[in-house]
Image: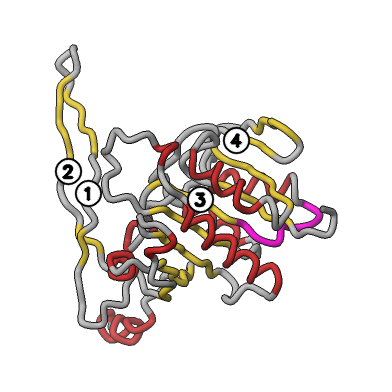
Amino acid sequence: MLNKKTILITNDDGFEAVGLKHLVEALQPIANIVVVAPDRNQSACGHSMTLNRPLKMMSFDDDSYTIDGTPTDCVFVSLHTLFKDIKPDLLISGINIGSNMGEDITYSGTVAGAMEAVLHKVPAIAISQVYNNLNSNENKDDWDFELAKQTIVKISEKILKDQFPLGERKLLNINIPQIKPSDCNGIKITKAGYREYGDDIHSHHNPRGEEFHWIGLHPLIWQSDEQKNCDFEAIKAKYVSITPIQLDLTSYNDIDKLKEWIL
């Protein structure tokens, strides 16, 4: 056990999430696992950090902790307390319940956990399990994570044995189709697609007559193109999608255009 490398795990669905449990179960045979996850669901919190109050870290055993904050908080605090001397060899954020494709990565707390890791020069992966109907009353404990587990073990072993395939401030964003491993057509390296967003918002009044609004879930609709090489298209075609993500958001193609425009 002592010669195994160390994987730090976080998520945005919270410490009790079924996807987190499956991720730990899959990776325990290949690495030392340290879990630092939010104490409650933090979905769609983006790359947010808690600055207006102190954060509390609670230990459940030697290698399992919760923090009453965001995935970004979890990674930042753990790297500067638990790992202040030796950094983990890899961070994995997930397994998220639901996809993180296209522009949804900007909302995602799952991807944000990986973003925070690469800012501190720790290789990172975000992994999400696509589900066609998140509104279903089906018990999440019965959902099939086998393809996600097999995929993350394969990619993690390759990284720990060899090296991370990307440069600094870049991460891998993995999305898993809702199929059995035997039905998967393989892995595709993809670009982030262009998501189409709807207007699923529910407006109501509470007993005091005050209006409130509840944002719903949007169906997975995207702009298709001839190449069909985006993450959405890969999932539709029963492939695992792996998208390289960089934190540099600069639109380099527009720099010269903007210089001409401003002058």
Dot 1 or dot 3: first in sequence order is 3
Residue 172, horizontal then vertical, whole percent = 50, 67
Residue wearing tag 2: 200
Q: Are discs 1 and 2 less than 8 Å apart at CB?
A: yes
How many residues crowd mark 2 within 10 Å: few (<14), some (14–19), many (20+)? few
- Disc 1 to disc 2, C-alpha distance: 6 Å
> Residue shown at 75%/51% (left/top)?
83
Q: Are discs 4 and 2 less than 8 Å apart at CB?
A: no
Residue wearing tag 1: 218
199 to the left or right of 63: left
Residue 175, horizontal then vertical, whole percent = 41, 61
Dot 2 or dot 3: first in sequence order is 3
How many residues crowd mark 4 within 10 Å: few (<14), some (14–19), many (20+)? many
Q: Which of the numbered marks, if any, corresponds to residue 67? A: 4
Residue 89 counted in the magenta span: yes
On screen, residue 171 above or below 117:
below
